[in-house]
Image: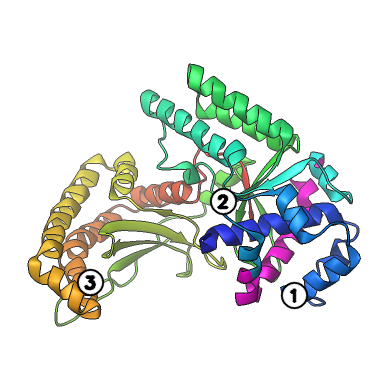
Amino acid sequence: MADQTSTQEAAQALFCAMADYVGVSKIENVFDNKKYPIYTLFKEDWNKNNKTISIQNIFQNHVTAPGVTLSNIESLFKADSGWYQSSVSIAKKLIQDIDTISRQFNKIKTPNWSDILYVRGDSDIMKNIENIFKIANKTQQKIGGVVLGDVNKWSPADIYFASNDAKKTIKNLLDEGIKNSITFKRMNSVLNKLITDGELLPVSLKKQPGEVHIVKVNFDRKKELQEIEKYGYNGTSQWKLYSENSPQTRDLKIYFEKNSQKSYIKTRHDASSNVLKTEVEISGALARGGSIGSVGILTKLISVVDPAFSQKFLNAYNDGQIEFTKRMKDKGMILLKSKDKKIFDQIRGKYSGLLITNKVFPMYIQWLNSNKKRSDAYVQMIYQYITSRTPVSGNFIIAK
């Protein structure tokens, strides 16, 4: 059975395909959440007015989403009408404004089908792009450049609009990389040109049943840097040492907007997976701005501005993690987990606070507070990395 995220993303691809067929001239009338507040009403009207083009036909012939069925999508819409309304709103906004990304996308705005396929998790586009990314990332490691943790730090696109020409070009680029290796500069040059030519569009999705905004990311590096430079280190949340008599939160927030605590970089120890996670929360967004699930990547970013502290932080974390792991493997804890999961979770959380966050957060806060200029640079760098805005990241859009 398809997982929820895959189904949500495939649902958006489906409505983008339907918007392609409808065309911009009729989109306001057909994609109307006030007239059709639930999917059942939308489907009834679609079937009445489009007898030869069923939603099932569109899904089968114009959407590629392995592992997801139309039944999965319709069950999602039945359970949560917000996802249906978000799919409608985003698809409508994209077809209305897609020529602001490139005029070559005007072909999508006319009624009936363009040559674009709408894909989520497919082999020819998304998997091949991920394989190209892996080759370019290895090249970066060899030449000492920026190395990204995964493809989402190059582009967090959830779905792609892609033509047959894009499919062929991507396959040729992958073949080139396998044969001769490849750099991010080469990768971005080819894929960004496909976007300019109206053959490819990477779309990162945020649930938005209301007013939708389309944000272009990495299209103008100078503009991106101007936005990033507005951010800096503006203090942390009021974190306190964890104790058995006074349990405290096990996360630390770093505020990066002046006079606001609504946007922050949050680091926490996930006791269930025994992993230190760092994520960006952005004011007004309906989803996280991205995350890092590895202390190794976090300390590599710290090492760019302070190698000595990076190693100190990593050593302290590793010491705490070793002790935490020992406690979790204790026979008493294993027995407790099988008998009383609730109590087990509470004790596991206690050990997370005592053995890990108590070790690393005090030194982290002291380090951040000791040098404002360095901390500003660190915050800007980690923001770029987590939100896929590094110098080697690709072009994509956010629909939110």
Left-right relation of 191 to 330: right
Q: Residue at x 88, y 62 (%)?
A: 50
Residue picked out by circle 1: 40
Q: State how far apart marks 1 and 2 are (Cα).
A: 42 Å
259, above or below 227, in the image? below
Q: Position of residue 130 (x, y in %)?
A: 51, 38
Mark 1 Cα-neighbour bin, 10 Å: few <14, some 14–19, many ≥20? some
Instruction: Work out whether 99 lies above or below 129.
Output: below
Mark before the other along the chain sequence, 1 or 2: 1
Residue 349: assigned label: 3
Q: Are marks 3 and 2 in contact (CB under 8 Å)?
A: no
**Which mark identifies residue 227?**
2
User: Closer to us: mark 1 or mark 2?
Assistant: 1
- Magenta extent: 75-103
Evaluate whether residue 377 shows in this view: yes
Dividing the picture into quadrants, the one containing residue 73 is bottom right
Tell me which corner region of the image, top left, top right, bottom left or bottom right, holds residue 172.
top right
Say which of 27 and 338 sits in front: 338
Name which residue type carries label 3: Gly
* Magenta stretch: includes residue 92: yes
Colouring scheme, one of rainbow, by chain, secondary structure, one colour: rainbow
Which residue is nearer to you in this view: 349 or 380?
Answer: 349
Q: Give whichever of 203, 22 is nearer the camera.
A: 22
**In the image, farthest residue toward the left:** 331
In terms of secondary structure, where does tag 1 sit?
A: helix
- Amino acid found under the numbered disc labelled 2: Glu
Q: Say which label, 3 or 2, has the lower sequence index.
A: 2
Q: Is residue 97 magenta?
A: yes
Q: Residue furthest top?
A: 180
Other-residue count near label 2 (Cα within 10 Å), few / some / many at <14 / 14–19 / ≥20: few
